[in-house]
Image: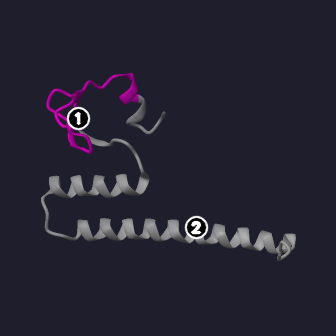
Amino acid sequence: MTPLPPEGLQDLLLDLRRARQDAAEERRLRNALLQGLSLVSSPRSAEAMTEEMLAILQSTLDFEAAFLLIPDESGSLTTWASTLPQFEQATWEIGPLFSRVQPGVF
């Protein structure tokens, strides 16, 4: 039976494991950035590009749902693109929540 490595060696092994995990995460993010750059430089419609960009972001940032909202002529916000079909035709009135979020204040 082999004795356990000294504590210092165990710390080095933990550091190596963390460094490998960090490197894998950085590779994943770099690949997502390259996918986004490739998408932006390709000849696609704005709608198709937006939907694909949301898919790239969703796989990278691991969120359940996202949608891009644009103001309509009545001043409400309408969904321009969404990761969930049930929000594709949604409209939101600009109330206190959106008033706080728009300038970036939560």
From the top left corner, tell me how far across and down residue 3 is, in percent: 86, 74
**Is disc 2 surrounded by few (<14), some (14 to 19) or many (20+) residues within 10 Å?**
few
88, above or below 53, in the image: above
Q: Nearer the viewer, residue 27 or 77?
A: 27
Q: Would residue 68 be found to the left or right of residue 73 on screen?
A: right
Residue 89 falls in image quadrant: top left
49, above or below 66, in the image: below
From the top left corner, tell me how far across and down residue 1 is, in percent: 83, 75
* Residue type at the position of mark 1: Phe
Magenta highlight on residue 84: yes
Q: Residue at x 14, y 63 (%)?
A: 44
Q: Are marks 2 and 1 in contact (CB under 8 Å)?
A: no
Residue at label 2? 22
Q: Residue at x 31, y 65 (%)?
A: 36
Q: CA distance from mark 2 to mark 1?
A: 35 Å
103, above or below 34, in the image: above
Q: For the magenta stretch, what is the residue range?
A: 70-99
* Residue type at the position of mark 2: Asp
Among numbered discs 2 and 1, the one appearing first in the sequence = 2
From the top left corner, tell me how far across and down residue 90 is, in percent: 20, 31
Residue at label 1? 87
**Is disc 1 surrounded by few (<14), some (14 to 19) or many (20+) residues within 10 Å?**
some
Magenta highlight on residue 9: no
Q: Nearer the viewer, residue 85 or 43?
A: 85
Q: Residue at x 41, y 34 (%)?
A: 101
Q: Residue at x 35, y 52 (%)?
A: 58
Q: Secondary structure at mark 1?
A: helix
